[in-house]
Image: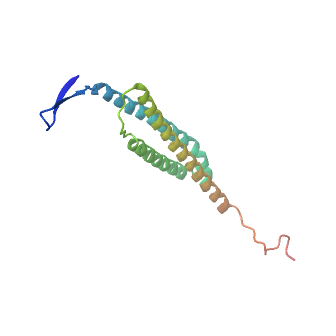
């Protein structure tokens, strides 16, 4: 504990202010621990989701591209690269913290909040990818199926 004198302009009055020394090393360790835990968990989940999408999305893309496996693999790889760029970019932007952490409880709550948001973003990206795959597949099926017009006769011509 330090004591700092405060002087007043009136009659030489001196006030003393008690200032407690904060242990900034301990506070910094909470922040560093939170950052490392957040990065480890969010990157691990991002990699797992990307690999799952890559492996299971290939089947849909091969079907959508009428058996052209080379084109399907190329598009699949590009989708995974885009997925990584968006999610890792978000994870790094969300790393910043404005508050000071003074207890382990606050550190756990901070990591929990950040991981929860990352999981929601990953879930949203997953459903977006499923939507894109289903649209590609649906479009390829409508293009390959024959169209019937109402004006053409169904039976044999006389």
Residue 88's quadrant in the figure? top left
- Residue at 42% of width from left, 47% of height from top? 85
- Name, please, the residue furthest toward the front: 11
- Please indicate whether residue 20 sits to the left or right of residue 79 in the image: left
Q: Is residue 153 visible?
A: yes
- Residue at 38% of width from left, 33% of height from top? 35
Q: Considering only vertical position in the picture, is 132 above or below 91? A: below
Quadrant in which the C terminus is drawn: bottom right
Q: Position of residue 148 (x, y in %)?
A: 75, 68
Q: Position of residue 130 (x, y in %)?
A: 59, 48
- Name, please, the residue furthest toward the left: 12
| Count of all numbered marks drawn on residues in the image | 0
Q: Considering only vertical position in the picture, is 8 above or below 74? A: above
Nearest the viewer among 84 and 114 is 114
Quadrant in which the N terminus is drawn: top left
Q: Position of residue 72 (x, y in %)?
A: 55, 50
Residue 2's quadrant in the figure? top left
Nearest the viewer among 107 and 12 is 12
Q: Position of residue 115 (x, y in %)?
A: 47, 36
Nearest the viewer among 103 and 36 is 103
- Residue at 62% of width from left, 52% of height from top? 134
- Name, please, the residue furthest toward the bottom: 158
- Please indicate whether residue 134 sits to the left or right of residue 105 in the image: right
Q: Considering only vertical position in the picture, is 118 above or below 23? A: below
Q: Is residue 67 visible?
A: no
- Please indicate whether residue 2 sits to the left or right of residue 144 in the image: left
């Amino acid at each position: 504990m330090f004591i700092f004198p405060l002087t007043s302009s009136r009659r030489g009055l001196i006030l003393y202010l008690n200032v407690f020394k904060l242990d900034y090393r301990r506070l910094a360790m909470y922040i560093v621990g939170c950052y490392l835990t957040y990065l480890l968990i969010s990157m691990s989940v991002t990699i797992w989701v990307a690999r799952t999408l890559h492996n299971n999305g290939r089947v849909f893309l091969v079907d959508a591209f009428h058996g052209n496996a080379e084109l399907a693999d190329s598009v699949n790889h590009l989708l995974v690269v885009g997925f990584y760029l968006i999610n890792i970019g978000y994870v790094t932007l969300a790393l910043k913290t404005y508050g000071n952490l003074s207890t382990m409880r606050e550190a756990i709550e901070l990591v929990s909040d950040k991981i929860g948001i990352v999981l929601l973003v990953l879930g949203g990206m997953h459903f977006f990818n499923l939507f894109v795959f289903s649209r590609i597949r649906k479009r390829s099926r409508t293009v390959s199926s024959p169209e019937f017009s109402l004006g053409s006769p169904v039976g044999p011509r006389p």
